[in-house]
Image: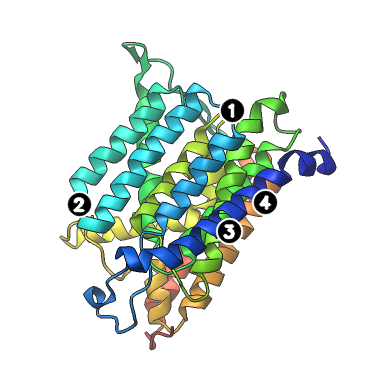
Amino acid sequence: MDFQNVLAQYWWVAVSSFLLTFLLALFALRMFPSWGLMDRPHRYGLTRKSIPYYGGLVIFLSFLIAVILFVPITKAVIGLLIGATLIAILGFLDDLLGISPFVRLFVQLLAALVLVFSGIGIYSINFPFFGVLNFSGVVVGGVLVLSAIFTVLWVMTIVNVMNFVDGVSGLTSGVAFVSGMTIFLLSINPTLHADISSQVGVATIALILSMTGLAFLIFDFPKPKILMGDTGSTFLGFVIATLAIFSGGKVATAFLVLGIPILDMIWVVLRRIFSGQKFWKGDLKHLHHRLMDIGFSERQVVILYLFITAFFGITAVLLVSSQQKFFMIISLAVLMLLLAIALVLVPRGRRKL
């Protein structure tokens, strides 16, 4: 499949998804204030005026409409949409009312199990130099137990990784754009798939995700006009996690693209646990917060984050073998370690906006 054929097949999906999100965001900017769907900056000690909140509804609705219009409806796609709807509703209620972290984790578990029973799962992991770890050994009631466990853990991890990233406007929508585009480019690469037609659904959904993220980024950066909230961040995380395992498995790719956010979440959770804090209780010690503490502006943090994410996304597209991706993941971990050491040693400056 050459570039012209790809362009002819997917350009309308890209344009439609982008315009749909863009127009819905304009509608939200106009209507959300009259509906009372605004953020509450005073709760966080901010003095700025309120801006429209719950922008995740825009992301969810535009994605849902685009998938129904452009993607053949299969059992797996239905599972994705049901699980994603559960996550979006959970995020909206959490934004609106505030929900217990245990309830959030329970609903995330249910959404992940919907995927499992829809036939979407991680059936094996290829460890470079060690071989393939197969999860098809233990079956209970027709369910591959180990596959289900790893699938649930993966989905819940990425959902919360994307939620953790949503601390600076532009980060989550930007990461979603890069992640979706990376999976799209891998899905349309004929050298990676014996039957490229089997990847059309994945490629289309990934492109919809990417264009939705890009359109929302226009309203999210450099100065936010609308905030997505947990409604958007957790929904985007669920879709990315699902695409990574949907039809062919691109978990290593997603781990590479989301490497910085994933390692940041692991660091933050471990630090909270070992310091005697509740690991689910939010704070201002994520990587993006620490970068602002040493003098980076919010715009600079977003640009740096997205530059690194895009670099590893391009790397994931260009590097085909699992051994190459393994070495890149190790490099990413080393980069994160060096960055953490630098943030500890560099004296804190004054935050810029």
Dot in front, 1 or 2: 1
Residue 275 percent location from the top left of the image: 19, 63
The C terminus sits in image quarter = bottom left
Colour scheme of the rendered structure = rainbow
> Distance between the Cα atoms at labels 2 and 3?
29 Å
Q: Which mark is residue 72?
A: 1
Q: CA distance from mark 4 to mark 1?
A: 19 Å
Q: Relative to the observer, which residue lies in front, 29 or 340?
A: 29
Mark in the foreground, 3 or 1: 1
Give the amino acid at mark 1.
Answer: Pro
Between discs 3 and 1, the one toward the N terminus: 1
Residue farthest to the top, as pictured: 141
The residue lying at 37 percent from left, 55 percent from top is 163
- Residue 24: horizontal and vertical position, in percent? 50, 56
Q: Image point 25% across, 53% down: which residue?
A: 94
The residue identified by callout 4 is: 15
Residue type beneath disc 2: Ile
* Kind of residue indicated by mark 4: Val
Whole-Å distance between the Cαs marked 3 and 1? Answer: 24 Å
The mark lying in front, picked from 4 and 3, is: 4
Q: 10 Å neighbourhood of mark 4: few (<14), some, or many (≥20)?
A: few
Real-space Cα distance between discs 2 and 4? 36 Å
